[in-house]
Image (cartoon, rainbow, N blue to C red):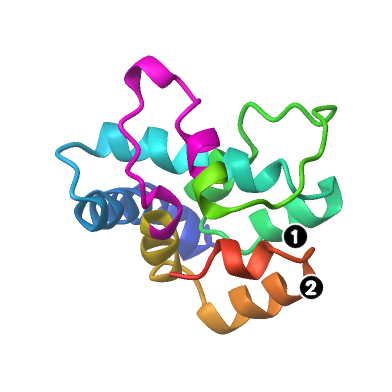
């Protein structure tokens, strides 16, 4: 059996996402975009059970899936969804001396991410997650 196409093109698809998110956020670098995306993913992940987080990760393209689960402390205390402003401040805490996340970081990542996934499947999954998950990913 051949290697599935999503694995063959994983790096290209990841870079396409980074460029799209960079342009959406008005950034100058995909490196900055990487940190913003990782921060948004960690903030969202902290609000899910392990089972729900894995279900969410499975709907992402390969490299974004890997980023979503990287550096995961599964024993970290679960948080509740709060205001977008509060959660954006939490995004900015990741590598805060090198984090240039925008005030619209969550929305910026949501817009770019939605262009990389099957939106119908994405929304169907979000509807099964805890209250606040759907609102988090509205673009």
The residue at the point 40 percent across, 39 percent down is 36
Residue placed under numbered mark 1 in the picture: 55
- Image: magenta residue range: 88-107
**Relative to the observer, which residue lies in front, 85 or 110?**
85
**Relative to the observer, which residue lies in front, 109 or 119?**
109
Image x and y of residue 93, in percent: 50, 25
Give the Cα separation between the discs numbered 2 and 1.
10 Å
- For numbered disc 2, what is the local secondary structure? helix
Q: Which mark is residue 115?
A: none
Image x and y of residue 62, in percent: 53, 52
Of the two numbered discs 2 and 1 on the same chain, state the one appearing first in sequence: 1
Find out whether residue 60 is within the magenta segment: no
Q: Can residue 1 be seen?
A: no
Q: Is residue 115 above or below residue 6?
A: below
Q: Which quadrant would the C terminus be assigned to in this image?
A: bottom left
Q: Nearer the viewer, mark 2 or mark 1?
A: 2
**Relative to the observer, which residue lies in front, 17 or 27?**
27
Find out whether residue 90 is within the magenta segment: yes
Q: Which mark is residue 128?
A: 2
- In-image side of 26 versus 118 (left or right): left
The residue at the point 76 percent across, 66 percent down is 131
Image x and y of residue 84, in percent: 53, 53
């Amino acid at each position: 059996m051949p290697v599935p196409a999503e694995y063959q093109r994983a790096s290209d698809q990841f870079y396409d996402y980074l460029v799209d998110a960079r342009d959406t956020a008005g950034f100058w670098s995909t490196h900055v975009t990487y940190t913003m995306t990782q921060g948004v993913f960690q903030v969202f992940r902290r609000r899910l059970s392990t089972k729900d987080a894995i279900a969410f990760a499975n709907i992402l393209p390969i490299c974004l899936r890997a980023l979503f689960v990287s550096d995961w402390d599964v024993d970290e205390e679960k948080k509740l969804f709060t205001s977008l402003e509060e959660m954006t401040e939490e995004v900015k805490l990741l590598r805060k001396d090198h984090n240039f996340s925008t005030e619209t970081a969550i929305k910026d990542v949501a817009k770019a991410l939605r262009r990389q996934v099957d939106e119908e499947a994405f929304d169907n999954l979000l509807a099964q997650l805890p209250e606040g998950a759907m609102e988090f990913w509205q673009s």
